[in-house]
Amino acid sequence: MASITAEDISFYRTKAPEFIELHDQVETSLDLLDNLETFLSTFQTDLTSVAGQISELQRRSKEIEERLKGRRRIERPLASLIADLTVPPELATLLLDTNVGEPWLEAIPQFEKIFDSIKERGRVKASKDLTEVAQALGLVVATKLRSFFLALLQPIRSNMSTNMQVLQTSVLLKYRTLFKYLQRSHPTVATELQRAYTGTARTYYETGFRRYIRGLTAIKGRSGEPFELVGANNERVETELKVAHLENASLDGPAVTMAFMADEKNYKEPVEGLFRSLVIVVMDNASAEYSFIRQFFNREDQNEPSASRATSVIGDDDHLESVNESSDAEPRPRHHILAHRRQSSTSSVVSVRSAILRKQREEDAYFAEIWKQVMEPVLQYTEAFVQSIINPSLLEPKPSVVPILTMIRFNEAAYQEAGKRGCTPLETFLVGLRISLWPTFQSEMSAHVESLKKLADAATGSMLVRGNIRDTVVRAVSSSSQL
């Protein structure tokens, strides 16, 4: 302290305010640093909390993104499911509020597709809820279609002059898609409509052909020619062979006799011409009816065997063969494998073909039964008319052998034409007509032969006058025998 001079003390005293101010600044800085330290500690805590929140947001963002990807993956299948299970309002309005018409031709397949989708997705809760609604809508559709088809048949029932073929080709076949829907979804209604059609068509053809055959019978009653044996010893006017009548043995012969021609009292037609007209009319109507039945009442079968099934069966045999080869302790020779393969393939193809043929036979029998229900009265009337020709009453002349032969030949031509048209049931009926005509032809030919024998014996043994012998050939034989 002795070294501190008064000058130093004076200096410090002079600088004392500065030192005090500096001290205060230091104190203030310390306070500020303490506050800054506190702020930084709080900021670090807040920053840690924010970092945690950001991590949570990132995690939630990833979850949302995964959900979005999942929804995008199921968006198309879900949209397809909704489209399949939902009946569009415009479709429901069309089926409920409009009458059956051309718009239904597209609406019914769409509704059937939706209804099938609902049934296929029975495990989906929404489809269970919609099943009752779809079934109710289907009942409404079936009711409307039933009334629609019955109304189409009404003109035939009320007016027999209605053209059946026009109704079939222009109306019924046009709406056969709707009938197919009834066959698949409402078979009871389809069966009822089928019975209604067969009954209506049966009455239509029965009435029409009864009137037509009545007219032919009236013409036949005034067109008969007397039947005489070749060797008959008769001086009456000789029966001449009319070559024009032989044209009735061909399909391209004279024009068909119409029913109104019976009103003309002087109109005549040979029995072979009447037979030809009747058979042509029956063949045209029967073949047209059979063609319509096959198209309109055709039943669809999802289990029908096909060539693709045969291929799959053969493929399965190959697979089994490879399995057997791998399971054998020793591989079989190559020719044994090929032989087994050919045998399996052949048996598979044969079984499939047999199934197809069996299915075709069942379908043919089904269509033939419907056709028979419709055309049975027509066939009965036709057979009765033919029997009236070959077995006439006592007041009518019996036809000669040439008209009978002409009818047989035309029957054969009609049989071939029916085969070309694919009308199998009509072929069976024509075979029956041929069977009924042949005994009459054989009987008459035998009678002619016997008459010639008797005439030849009489001419040879008794030297009869040549003028009594009508046939020129027999005359020549008689003359040569007398010489």
Image (spheres, rainbow, N blue to C red):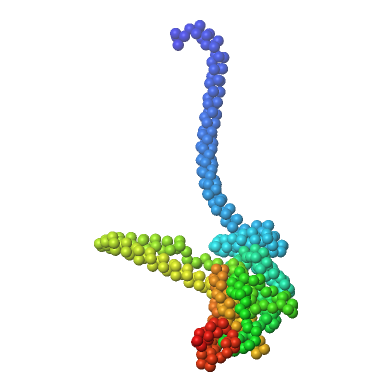
Q: Which residue is pictured at 50% across the width and 67% down the height?
A: 303
Q: Position of residue 213 (x, y in %)?
A: 67, 79
Res 92 → quadrant? bottom right
Res 203 → quadrant? bottom right
Q: Position of residue 277 (x, y in %)?
A: 64, 74
- Total marks shown come to 0
Specify whether 105 is left or right of 477: right
Q: Residue furthest bottom?
A: 462
Image quadrant in which the N terminus is located: top left
Q: Which residue is pictured at 61% across the width and 61% down the height?
A: 109
Q: Which residue is pictured at 54% across the width and 51% down the height?
A: 74
Q: Which residue is pictured at 59% across the width and 67% down the height?
A: 295
Q: In the rendered image of this protein, does residue 39 appear above or below residue 380?
A: above
Q: In the rendered image of this protein, does residue 32 appear above or below residue 126?
A: above
Q: Residue furthest front?
A: 483
Q: Position of residue 313 (x, y in %)?
A: 41, 63
Q: In the rendered image of this protein, does residue 405 appear above or below residue 25?
A: below
Is 73 in front, or is 45?
73
Is 405 in front, or is 101?
405
Is 442 in front, or is 199?
442
Q: Position of residue 167 (x, y in %)?
A: 68, 67
Q: Is residue 397 visible?
A: no
Q: Is residue 162 visible?
A: yes
